[in-house]
Amino acid sequence: SSPSGRFAPVIAHLRANLSRKVTRGELARIAALHPTAFDRAFVRAVGQTPLRVLTEMRLSEARRRLESTGDTLESIASA
């Protein structure tokens, strides 16, 4: 199931920022929620924490690059 409503922009932001640190505060601002309320609502809507979603996105992108490009593991890890 795909997250909808206020969390779609959060998911898009995570996907667009795979290579940098993303803070809970910036994600909460995107969702227009207080950070504590954001954490609870995100897990309720998406089924995972934002950190878990981001980690899975990063792993998926690394896997894709390993399988479909000539990139080395070292270059993918440093990206």
Image (cartoon, grey):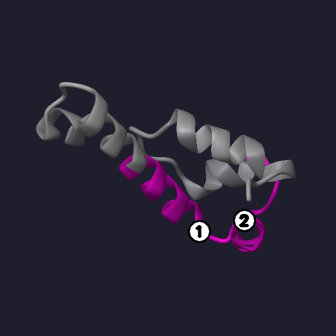
x then y, percent, for residue 17: 50, 36
Say which amino acid is labelled 2. Phe
Q: Residues within 10 Å of mark 2 (few under 14, many from 20)?
A: many
Q: Quadrant of residue 8?
A: top right
Q: Which residues are magenta?
A: 30-59
x then y, percent, for residue 47: 67, 71
Which residue is disc 1 drawn over? 49
Q: Which structural element holds mark 1?
A: loop
Residue 60 in sight in this render? yes
Residue 69: which disc? none
* Chief SS of the magenta region: helix
Q: Is residue 71 above or below residue 27?
A: above
Asked if residue 31 lies in the magenta stretch, the reply is yes
Q: Quadrant of the C terminus?
A: top left
Q: Nearer the viewer, residue 76 or 27?
A: 76
Asked if residue 20 lies in the magenta stretch, the reply is no
Residue 79 in sight in this render? no
Q: CA distance from mark 1 to mark 2?
A: 7 Å
Residue 52 left/right relative to 27: left
x then y, percent, for residue 28: 71, 55
Q: Residue furthest right?
A: 5
CB-based contact (under 8 Å), mark 1 and mark 2: yes
Residue 68 left/right relative to 24: left
Q: Which structural element holds mark 2?
A: helix
Residue 42: which disc? 2
Q: Is residue 47 above or below residue 77?
A: below
Residue 50 left/right relative to 34: left
Residue 57 left/right relative to 47: left
